Image (cartoon, rainbow, N blue to C red):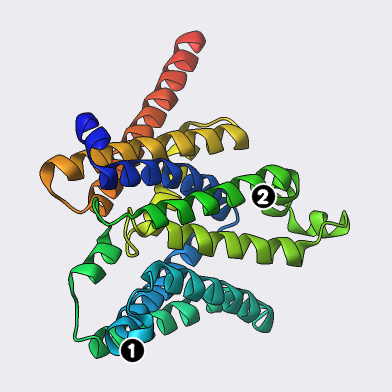
Amino acid sequence: MIEAIFQYEFLRNTFITGLLIGFIAPLLGTFIVVRRLSLIADALSHVTLAGIATSLFFSKTFPLFAGMNPLYFGIGFSVIGSLLIERLRLVYKHYQELAIPIIMSGGIGVSVIFISLADGFNTDLFSYLFGSVSAVSRMDLYLILGIAIFVGIIIILLYKEWFLLSFDEEHAKVAGIPAKFLHFLFMLMTALVIAASMRIVGILLVSALMTLPVAASMRIARGFKQTIWLSILFGEISVIGGLISAYYLDLAPGGTIVVLSIFILLITILLKRLRTKGVLWNVRGERA
């Protein structure tokens, strides 16, 4: 595949995009998991699907939208969905988790309607659902690069604030941290990362890339920063290995990336068990 990357532009675009997604998805996913908001990624991915389906219908029905990149509609819908989730969390203060299934259901409903209007599934829609090795254009790469730079800079600048919000929100508010604004910004970034990741991983599987590497790193990491770096490492391994496997086996990359992520998770769980047993054996040996 290395030779093919230098030979074909679409493979270069896909590989570079994969490296970017493998970095920003687990990076943001670490904060998502710690804040117990993992299902938000699923909700926004379904809202993004609604945007893609709407774009495909509009491009087929109205000449004005014929050449528009569906990624723009996906990002727009994802951002709107994140704002609605945040609004509903304020409406249902004592039942904030209701916001997620409400938006997820709405996203699925709108998706089904516009998929039906667009005469069902087609090749373009399948590439958005499950990812594609050949679907990433140069414009997609530039857009995803911009999102990656934006997310990386914001996390670096606001790392301490988000760290405190993730582990002790009440203390963060008392300390004068603008919790509402930071939470809104966090939701916006999540929406952008999900929309950016769908080209490689696919809409239906993007949440896995944001949570599985984090779940694996949490089994063996010692401290929050180490969890972040291990999550990024596992995410990059999953993406690179998944893209190579998808290329040679002619498969959708989303599936291979997720399966590899699960395989890494199982290895870390096994290592954790072996480490725990080793400690127990040492303690028993010392007592004997």
Foreground: 280 or 142? 142
Residue positioned 61% across, 37% down in the render: 224
Number of residue marks: 2
Residue positioned 49% across, 59% down in the render: 38
Amino acid bearing label 1: Phe
- Tell me the element at label 2: helix
Residue 129's spot in the image, x, y percent? 28, 65
Q: Is residue 183 visible?
A: yes
Foreground: 180 or 152? 152
Q: Earlier in the sequence, mark 2 or mark 1?
A: 1
Q: Position of 75 compared to 66: left or right?
A: right
Residue 47's spot in the image, x, y percent? 43, 75
Q: Few, some or many C-alpha atoms within 10 Å of disc 1 (few <14, some 14-19, many ≥20)?
A: few
Foreground: 125 or 9? 9
On the image, numbered disc 1 is attached to which residue?
A: 62
Residue positioned 57% across, 76% down in the render: 85
CA–CA distance in space, label 2 to label 1: 38 Å
Q: Is residue 241 above or below residue 115?
A: above
**Labelled disc at residue 154:** 2
Q: Quadrant of residue 182?
A: bottom right
Q: Position of 3 compared to 40: left or right?
A: left
- Tell me the element at label 1: loop
Q: Is residue 131 above or below residue 27?
A: below
Give the mark toward the camera: 2 or 1: 1
Residue positioned 60% across, 65% down in the render: 188
Amino acid bearing label 2: Ile
Q: Few, some or many C-alpha atoms within 10 Å of disc 2 (few <14, some 14-19, many ≥20)?
A: few
Q: Is residue 37 visible?
A: no
Q: Is residue 122 above or below residue 242?
A: below
